[in-house]
Amino acid sequence: MDIKTHESIDRSLCGEPISLEPGRSEVRLRCLESMAADASGLVHGGFIFGLADYAAMLSVNHPNVVLGGAETRFLKPSRVGDTLVARAQDETPDERRHLVKVEVFSGEETVFAGTFTCFVTREHVLAGK
């Protein structure tokens, strides 16, 4: 896998890439105790969103890709101990603006779905700052 973006991301928080090809990615995340929002072991949605966002970025796989917006739905709760897999598909490759469909699964169940609007900028968003 030739990963060209988000090289320094903490994979324990955002997931481990398991598949990468042009316009597609799969990322796996183990839900850790530190991700729990309460004593029941409910995983905070921010970690699931982070997994989906990382999968979207990898599907574009450009050094200057950034997230512009997202329309998402949490469909089922996730718990500490779950293993989640995000599958991302870039619906508009070869454009500066990419619409990426992402689904997150726990086993066979879909727990999250969304469309991420990603942009490839001419230079890094922090260049010159």
Image (tube, helix red, strand yellow):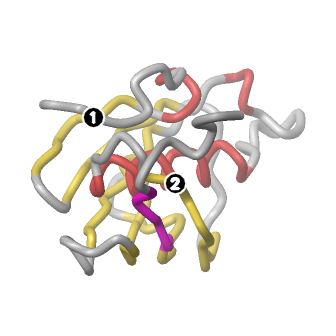
Nearer to the camera, 85 or 88: 88
Helix, strand or loop: magenta stretch: strand
Residue pictured at 48% horizontal, 20% vertical: 8
Q: Secondary structure at mark 2?
A: strand
Q: In the image, 73: left or right of 113?
A: right
Residue pictured at 41% horizontal, 54% vertical: 122
**What residue did someone put label 1 on?**
4
Name the kind of residue labelled 1 in the image: Lys
The disc label shown at residue 66, or none: 2
Q: Name which of mark 2 and mark 1 comes first in the sequence.
A: 1
Numbered range of the magenta stretch: 116-121
Residue pictured at 84% horizontal, 39% vertical: 37
Q: Position of residue 17 (x, y in %)?
A: 29, 34
Name the kind of residue labelled 2 in the image: Val
Question: Does residue 128 show up magenta in the picture?
Answer: no
Spatial CA distance of label 2 from label 1 is 13 Å
Q: Position of residue 65 (x, y in %)?
A: 43, 52
Q: Position of residue 10 (x, y in %)?
A: 54, 21
